Amino acid sequence: MRASSRPFWLAGLVGAAVAAVVNLVVFALGRAADVPFVVTGNGSTTQIGAGPVAFVSVLSLLVGTVFAVLLARRGSRARRLAQAIGAAVALVSIAGPATQADEASTAVLLAAMHVIAGVVYVAAVEVAARQSDRGTAPAADAALQS
């Protein structure tokens, strides 16, 4: 059975917003605890701000959503593959903060943000797959139609 892409787009957009908000909360709590959020890479030092945290959170979920939509057309096994690849990318991407953060506290919180984005992605794909399999629109879509 061919899956509709609409639930995936809606879940991806909601997931992107959720990942951004949760990661911004982590960022704000880190800043309140004097975590510097400074990384050094390619010979330059960068102070990470709220803007890049939100942007990367949204971008990663939207790229993952495109990937999930393309794979969803191939069935449930392909959707599981999309989830596994998304989780793996989130975990592998932890290498960036782990190797470039100037302080351990920065590395831990940036790594946590990567994990959060990965968990939200896997959950969003699962919600979309279930909605698509049922042939029903997610609650967000139903709310838009009322």
Image: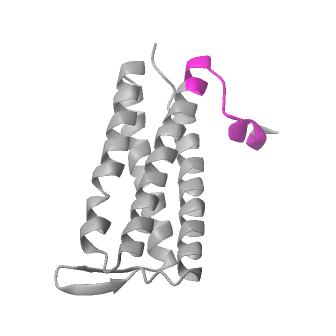
Q: Is residue 84 magenta?
A: no
Residue 74: percent from left, percent from top: 36, 21
Q: Residue at x 42, y 64 (%)?
A: 56
* Residue 32 on image: x %, y %: 59, 81
**Which residues are drawn in magenta?**
130-144
Q: Residue 33: percent from the left, percent from the top?
A: 56, 80
Q: Is residue 96 left or right of residue 58?
A: left
Q: Is residue 115 placed above or below 121 in the rendered structure?
A: below
Q: Is residue 142 magenta-colored?
A: yes
**Residue positioned most to the front:** 104
* Main secondary structure found in the magenta portion: helix
Left or right for 105, reference 97:
right
User: In this image, 49 relative to 128: left or right?
Assistant: left
Give the number of marks: 0
Can residue 24 be seen in this snapshot? yes
Query: What x and y, as percent, mark residue 95?
Result: 26, 60
